[in-house]
Amino acid sequence: MKRKKTIPKYNFKKIEKKWQQKWEKELIFSPNIKKAKKPFYNLMMFPYPSAEGLHIGGYFTFTGVDTLGRYKKMQGYDVFEPIGLDGFGIHSENYAMKIGEHIKDVSRRTEKNFYRQLRLTGNMFDWTRTVETYKPEYYQWTQWLFLQMFKNGLAYQKKAKVNWCPACKTVLSDEQVIGTQCERCEAVVEKKSLKQWFFKITDYAERLNKNLDWIDWPEDVKLSQRNWIGRSEGAEIKFKVQIEKLANQPTGKSINELIVFTTRPDTLFGATYMVIAPEHELIKNLKSEIKNYSEVEKYVKKALKKSEEERLNEKKAKTGVELKGIKAINPATNKKIPIFVADYVLSGYGTGAIMAVPAHDERDFEFAKKYNLPIREVVKEEASETNDKQGQEESCFSGEGIAINSDFINGLKAVEAKKEIIKWLRKNKIGQKKITYKLRDWCISRQRYWGPPIPIVWCKHCALKQLKESKKPVKVLIIHGFEADGNSNWFGWLKKELEKIGCEVYNPSLPNTLHPKSEEWRKALQPYLKKLDENSVIIGHSLGSKATVDLLSAADKKIKQVFLVASALGNPRRDWAKMKAEWIGSDVDALKKFWEKKVDWKRVNENIVGKTHIIFSEDDPHIDPEHYKIVKLEDLEIQRWSGHQHFVQFQNEKLRDYVIARILEEVRPLSVAVPEKELPVKLPPMEDFLPEGTGKGPLAKNEKFVRTKCPACGAEAERETDVSDAFLDSAWYFLRYPCTDLKSKPFDKTRLKNWLPVTSYIGGKEHVVLHLLYSRFVNMALKDWNFLDNEEPYQKFVGHGLITKDGAKMSKSKGNVINPDEMVEKYGTDTVRLYLRFMGDFTQGGDWSDSGAEGMKRFVERLWRTFFLLDSVSGVGVKNLSMLDKTIKSVGEDIEKLSFNTAVARLMELINWISDNLENFNQKEAEKIQKTVALVVAPLAPHIAEEFWLSLGNKKSIFGQAWPKYDPRKIVDESFELVIQVNGKVRDRFVVNKNISESEATALALESEKVQNHLAGKTPKKVIYIKGRLVSVVI
RNA sequence: GCCCGGGUGGUGAAACCGGUAUACACGAAGGACUUAAAAUCCUUUGGACUUAUCCUCCGUGCGGGUUCGAGUCCCGCCCCGGGCACCA
């Protein structure tokens, strides 16, 4: 083999491009997913494409992860290092809004740019398996995941308060709220109550918490998760609530009860008052018993209106109002204690009510001081605690101690006291042990455009049917008029039509329809009225409409809607004499009496919950078009039609459609899952994707999208217009990477068995709580449904640090952004990689310094030069090459620990050693050194390593090579420096053989002139010998 | 307020289980090469005392303690970064 004598130029642009293309073309880093024998899933959190493209911080992380991956590859693992883009979501959408472009165009451009930049890292990404969350091929499975949640009862809708930015007119996620302000426009964020989709992550709180005991994650990460889940053990205790005057009597009857949660049941005897949250239902339930209700109501309203900002500012200044007229009974002391409403108690935690123990809780103490409430001490501080009684006036003891003034638990330590109290609570059926969590359900709704549409269709027909099946159908009572019966006109026909959509219809024939009497009809209608409920409908025709009003005028029953068709409600302009002459044989007198009967409109209004519809035809010969004006109904809709005369046809489609439409309007539609095979529900292209601030997402504006057929019944229905949270996209992407080739399912259980849990997961600490928790939850749920085998998704997690510039976070406005493109252009990716590795601890991050990068550039050039200088050595040989063994060992171990900075330092030491000894190496040694250098450099500077490897005459990639072995015997030097200490201070050193015995070492120490000087003739008290290190002489 | 991290030369940082504090760099100073500059190479580089590279003393945020010996362990503080924030 010929060796070049001249040193080639280090042309990083050429070299890096060459190898990057080769790796990708030859699929060197695309492992065989199905057959991998030693899988190593080397995952990094995928980036969400943002404004300026890939950030140097992303570069730092990705290349760090890659260094580990390449090392593992050389150790013989089938390393899978995938990459993708998390480009769906508010973050990306906001950026598009900011620059005034369509998100679709921005995404297309960003994708191209990001992948270009990611290629520049030179990482061993598997480019055959990329994932983009905004592509239908991906998000159809995100929707699939939603459907699984839905099917299993873990997805539900409820009204919830969300962050609302009044300036941007949009819902914000918690992360977009900085303190109390909008991340983008800095307006103060409000709370708005909207219907939202949730995932019941709280069902998994216990397991999510418990598994933290065994998963291999850094303790601080686990701690953050534990804090977020916020498990507390305690007890639930029932307090009776009584009317005050009765409370004085021992037999006071309880009118209600108040359940509290406490972590300190042992302080029950010290509970001297109670506090409930402003939202607590007790306030409304006992409205009539609370004497100062208006004052209470005023406080509650004010508290609920308070913005976050106000609450934060007022945090320490506690306010509240006593609920006068009612008292609670402390079950332990049997004493009556006052109940307060105060906003320092949160409705969302525990039961929204507390027993206040002012003697042993700071907050209760402060409140009690302010409102002069009794403070009863029930815990004795133990002797070890500070006995400083001085501070008693200012604060309280909230630690655990020994129970006092507490009857049967006196003298017990807190742990025991708790147990005893809980036993007692159980025995008396007034309480039990209880565990609560701070964790709330996961709100996955976003009223925005750029996300996967939630695959739900809202169907009212299905809702009606469901009501029928659940024996709660919408009931319709049809009341006919004068000289008719239950089946005349359109009554019988409409009955059947309404039954088709699931209503239960009654069309009774009333007595004496030729001589109608209101009392008689009322009586006949009573049994039907009894069947009706708050969702029911009454349709009255002609005199039947008067009968309807008449019936409700005397009833004590609430119904939903009333339709008065060709309504005969009493018309002062009616010419009865003329009618009597024309209607020979009819009892017009009876009709008149009924017609003109007085109505208690107030009562009728109370009984109709929803709307009243008056429908008449302008050409009706019997009904004056102005007749409705005498009606005093509050929620009235007038339908003035024509061509129907007195509505006596056998069929009337217009009437039917009107009635059905109005019945459906009042029905809460049923959420129907889109069938899996109909996925994806594609996000429709929309020119205007901006949020409007109506509380509904932009998709609601798209009628074509909204209007659809119900997948269950085929009827007209509407699509859900919320899209899902970006956290959902990223909660499962690691399952997709190994399965991107699968078209018919999101992932394959057998295949994933080999790859899960993810071997190494590295990402930002800012995602330590939410993203990791959500993906753990999703993984756990999928395991429960037998889609996966493993319960926890990430075997190992490491959070990386951030890169700053001059100590500050990089931002465009500060003008301190380091652009990776520029750096790569200037130095080449190998140099940038090495510098980023060297600048500091991977988990801590570091501060970018230009001179540091310059220094690394010099090292890389020295490395290059030194390597090729080895081509032409002619020394006699140095014999001892143990430096190679040491470097192999420490570089390998350091990379394994992600301690990259020291790995680079070891590399530098190796190069220093080589140049120091360059004259002395013989050719054989030089070859061995070159080979080792190429191999140990490979994970850190892969392109240079390939080039080295090639120059040594190898045809194949260096990443098919094994990490070199070292000889453990050579790690320890033949000799070492023995340190001699006197009283712990270093006084002398000797280079000695590694096998020196204790007595030899001790003797050497005592003979030392310097030791002798310090001894000054005295005999040492003691001599300590630490093998391989030192001798310490104690005087 | 509470809970985590972290404070080591002029700078980025090393330091295994309590055992030589400052590895490896950056910067700086001096020197070699050069007409000159860049690049490269060599030397020095925690502080004080000192003719001295010897010796001695001081030195890992501050104050104590344990130990033959403490950056490392314990107690009490200060500062910086991050998270949570009335969670009963």
Image (tube, coloured by chain):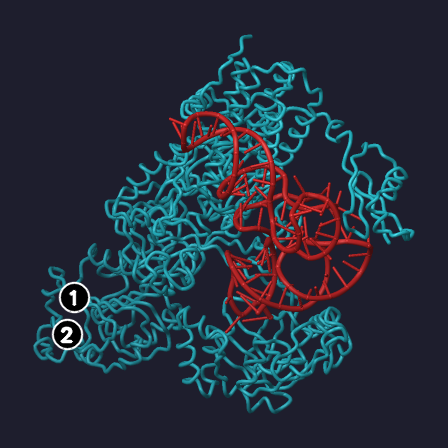
Chain colours: A cyan, B red
Residue A648 percent coordinates (x, y): 18, 61
Q: Which residue is drawn at 83% across and 51% down?
A: A1014
Q: Which residue lies furthest to the right in this view?
A: A1019
Q: Which residue is drawn at 67% across and 27% down?
A: A883
Please state which of residues B38 and A72 is positioned toward the viewer in this rendering.
B38
Q: Is residue A912 left or right of residue A831?
A: right
- Circle 1 SS class: strand
What amino acid is at disc 1? Phe
What amino acid is at disc 2? His
Quadrant (top left/top right/bottom left/bottom right) for the N terminus of chain A = top right
What distance separates the C-alpha of mark 2 from that of mark 1?
Answer: 10 Å
What residue sits right under mark 2 in the picture?
A627
Residue A102 percent coordinates (x, y): 27, 44
Position of residue A361 relative to residue A649, above or below, is below
Please state which of residues A333 and A993 is positioned toward the viewer in this rendering.
A993
Q: Decide: few, some or many residues near mark 1? Use Cα within 10 Å; few <14, some 14-19, many ≥20.
A: many
Task: Judge whether residue A805 can be spotted in this image.
Answer: yes
Q: Is residue A1000 left or right of residue A837?
A: right
Residue contact at pointers 2 and 1, CB within 8 angstroms:
yes
Residue A711 percent coordinates (x, y): 36, 44
Task: Judge whether residue A790 can be spotted in this image.
Answer: no
Q: Which chain carries label 1?
A: A
Quadrant (top left/top right/bottom left/bottom right) for the C terminus of chain A = bottom right
Question: Which mark, residue A155?
Answer: none
Question: Which mark, residue A616?
Answer: 1
Q: Decide: few, some or many residues near mark 2? Use Cα within 10 Å; few <14, some 14-19, many ≥20.
A: some
Please state which of residues A417 and A476 is positioned toward the viewer in this rendering.
A417
Q: Residue at x 22, y 81 (%)?
A: A597
Mark 2 vs mark 1: which is more N-terminal? 1
Q: Which chain carries label 2?
A: A
